Amino acid sequence: MSIRHFINLSDLSSTEIRTLLARATELKQRRAAGERPRLFEHKVLTMIFEKSSTRTRVSFETAMIEGGGGAIFLSPRDSQLGRGEPVEDTARVLSQMCDAIMVRTFAHDLVERLAQFASVPVINGLTDRSHPCQLLADMQTFFEHRGDIAGRKVAWVGDGNNMCNTYIEAAGLLNFQLAVAVPAGFEPAALSAQSGAGGHVTLTQDPAEAVRGADLVVTDVWVSMGQEEEAARRRLVMAPFQVNAALMARAAPGALFMHCLPAHRGEEVATEVLEAAHSVVWEEAGNRLHAQKALLEFLLQQGR
């Protein structure tokens, strides 16, 4: 079988995503029952981090350890990639020594180039363009609480960033309606291409309109890593896009709230929302472990 990579959410079909999510929930249930199957016996994951992380590193590393394998952490200070070694050379070398590569970085094309020259699966742990691993955890969380997301309405409020791009991709793949509310000038890059979303996505500058009747409300930080110089302007422009109790009241009864974390309380989300009963952010974060176990299992099996 050929090597499969996970660079964009669309690297999986709709059926594969749903199968993977079901497997993630199964692994979660087995872990709660005290079972930790050794899915990755003698397997090694190399993790390249050019952006700092809590959830991405701990979830991938824990997944490998609990599955009987191991994970190697490389920061820019720990590898020749950080000293200018070509990405193509790094991909070829790591492919000789490990079973999969996960990279969390700024430039999306770096992950694409790694995948082009690697002979093992490459996983996008986050880029400035997309964050598909987080989307898997988000969908697992929704499926566990509300069933399949097909036909539902999701509202994205805030910055048209990498997570927003990935939700646009997910809307077409999983057949839900996505209302994107962002300030003028902060529209998501994926919206122009629609990324296969077709008529599933609407764009507005009115958060109240986007959230009206939504089954899921999602936001993210207003200032991502690398945007610190724009922080003051971004906070000023996005202030009307804060997700607070008044905004959540416009959503459908039983609507869930998600945030990929870390959250800046009092900025993109009010503490009253983050700590409310409809907030599933902590379970969403925990599901990173289970979704990534299922993803790693899927990718490593494909190459056998």
Image (cartoon, rainbow, N blue to C red):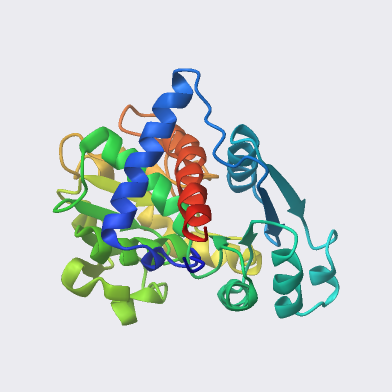
> Residue 29, position in %: x, y?
39, 26
Please identify the quarter of the rendering in which residue 65 is found.
top right
| Residue 8 in the figure: left or right of residue 68 | left
Q: How many marks?
A: 0
* Residue 102 point in image, percent of width and height: 62, 58
In the image, residue 104 above or below residue 107: above
Q: Is residue 222 visible?
A: yes
Q: Is residue 206 visible?
A: no
Task: Please tell me whether residue 85 is drawn above or below residue 252 in the rendered image.
Answer: below
Residue at 35% across, 45% down:
21
Toward the viewer: 75 or 230? 75
In-front residue for pair 191/136 = 136
Residue 55, position in %: x, y? 58, 43
In the image, residue 295 sits, relative to residue 22, either above or below, namely: below
Q: Residue at x 32, y 75 (%)?
A: 195
Residue at horizontal 70 percent and vertical 71 percent from the top: 91
Q: Is residue 219 left or right of residue 176?
A: right
Seen as rendered, the residue at the extreme top is: 33
Instruction: Answer above or below: position of 253 versus 186.
Output: above
Return the x and y of residue 219 as percentages of the image width and height: 39, 52
Q: Quadrant of residue 70?
A: top right
Q: Is residue 148 left or right of residue 187?
A: left
Pick the residue in front: 265 or 89.
89
Viewer-nearest residue: 282 or 104: 104
